[in-house]
């Protein structure tokens, strides 16, 4: 009896959930980064109007740069993770190529997968 290959839907759902989670993480980090940039802009305005000293601004610069670097690193890591997950999803979906069947008077024919041509190794 002919039967199609079934996709592992549980695994696919897990991958989908992980991609969604990492996407949300990226968005959250970007929002956090924007908040830090906004805070720094307000600090520079306070310095410009003489509310804080140059020394305080320099400390704020150092702290802001460290936070920005940390967030950029987290975003890059999440992007790399998403790429790996999406490649896994792509491979899983590519394995779902339909098998060719044909209904005939004598029953169902086909279902034979074509074998991949082997490449000859050079010596």
Image: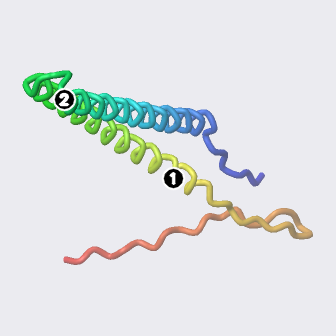
Q: Residue furthest front?
A: 49
Residue at the image position 61 percent from the left and 39 percent from the top: 8
Location of residue 4 in the rendering, given as x and y in whole percent from the top left corner: 71, 52
Above-or-below relation of 12 to 36: below
Badge 1 density bin: few <14, some 14–19, many ≥20, Cα 10 Å: few
At mark 1, the secondary structure is helix
Q: How is the image coloured?
A: rainbow
At mark 2, the secondary structure is helix
Quadrant of the drawing holding the C terminus = bottom left
**Is 88 left, or right, of 102 in this rendering?**
left
Badge 2 density bin: few <14, some 14–19, many ≥20, Cα 10 Å: some
Q: Residue furthest right?
A: 105
- Quadrant hosting residue 85: top left
Above-or-below relation of 4 to 101: above
Location of residue 42 in the rendering, given as x and y in whole percent from the top left corner: 30, 30
From the viewer's side, name the closer residue of 42 and 98.
42
Q: Earlier in the sequence, mark 1 or mark 2?
A: 2
Residue at the spot of label 1: 90
From the viewer's side, name the closer residue of 57 and 104.
57
Residue at the spot of label 2: 47
- Quadrant hosting residue 34: top left
Above-or-below relation of 64 to 89: above
Residue at the image position 40 percent from the left and 47 percent from the top: 83
Location of residue 7 in the rendering, given as x and y in whole percent from the top left corner: 63, 44
Residue at the image position 46 percent from the left and 73 percent from the top: 117
Residue at the image position 49 percent from the left and 32 percent from the top: 21
């Amino acid at each position: 009896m002919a039967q199609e290959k079934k996709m592992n839907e549980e695994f696919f759902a897990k991958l989908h959930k992980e991609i969604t989670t990492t996407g949300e993480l990226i968005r959250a980090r970007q929002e956090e980064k924007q908040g830090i940039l906004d805070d720094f802009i307000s600090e520079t305005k306070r310095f410009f109007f003489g509310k804080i000293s140059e020394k305080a601004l320099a400390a704020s610069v150092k702290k802001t740069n460290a936070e920005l670097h940390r967030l950029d690193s987290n975003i890059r890591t999440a992007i790399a993770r998403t790429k790996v997950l999406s490649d896994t999803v792509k491979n899983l979906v590519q394995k779902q190529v339909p098998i060719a069947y044909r209904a005939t008077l004598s029953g169902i024919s086909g279902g034979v997968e074509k074998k991949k041509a082997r490449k000859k190794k050079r010596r």
